[in-house]
Each structure stands twice: as C-alpha cells, then as structure tokens.
Image (cartoon, rainbow, N blue to C red):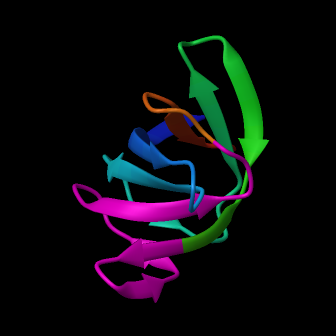
Amino acid sequence: MFKLGTVINFFEKTGVCVVELIQDIDINFKLKAMHEYKDTTDISIEFIQIGSKKTDFATKDQIVIIKFDKALRKGTEIYKNG
C-alpha cells in the first residue's frame, strides 16, 4: 500500500470529497481509506472531477473532487491497494 492523498474536505449533501493528491490516481485503482491510522476500509471511485470536468485520471499535486462509494471524513488518507 502506498499513499495517494488526503481528504481535506467532505460535503455531506453531495457526498463528494476534496482530495489533495501526492501521487497520480486513476478511477480504476483499488483503494483503501484509513482514518487516524486505525480504521481501514476498501473503497472505489465513482468519479473524479477537476474544475467542472469529470475525468478518469488526475496527477499528483492537484486538488480534486472525488466521489467515493462510501462516505469519508476529513483527514482520511487514501492508499492504493496492491
């Protein structure tokens, strides 16, 4: 597992997260979410959005909007599984 980014905000009404990326991310990646180094769960991406455009890929050092299949909290770290 290696870290891809961190959730810096979560919008409950729309269910989307703002994620600060430190590595590239792809919509097909198998991911794990870890909050406070203890709660780990498998997650998948429903969509990635940069500005007003949806995309299948985002590069490191970007701040993007991602809709995951599960609700995540601010501070949750996103890891690539495998």
Position of residue 68 measured from the top left corner of the image (x, y, whole percent): 65, 57
Position of residue 33 measured from the top left corner of the image (x, y, whole percent): 63, 35
Q: Nearer the viewer, residue 65 or 2?
A: 65
The quadrant in which the C terminus is found is top right
Position of residue 80 measured from the top left corner of the image (x, y, whole percent): 59, 46
Spot the residue most to the bottom.
53
Spot the residue most to the left.
61
Q: What residue lies at 53% left-to-right and 13% top-to-bottom?
A: 36
Q: How many marks?
A: 0
Asked where in the image residue 42 lies, by quadrant, the reply is top right
Q: Is residue 4 left or right of residue 16?
A: left
The verdict on residue 14 being magenta is no
Q: What residue lies at 32% left-to-right and 66% top-to-bottom?
A: 59
Q: Is residue 29 above or below residue 80?
A: below
Q: Nearer the viewer, residue 39 or 59?
A: 39
Position of residue 58 measured from the top left corner of the image (x, y, whole percent): 38, 70
Q: Is residue 37 left or right of residue 63?
A: right
Q: Which residues are magenta?
A: 48-71
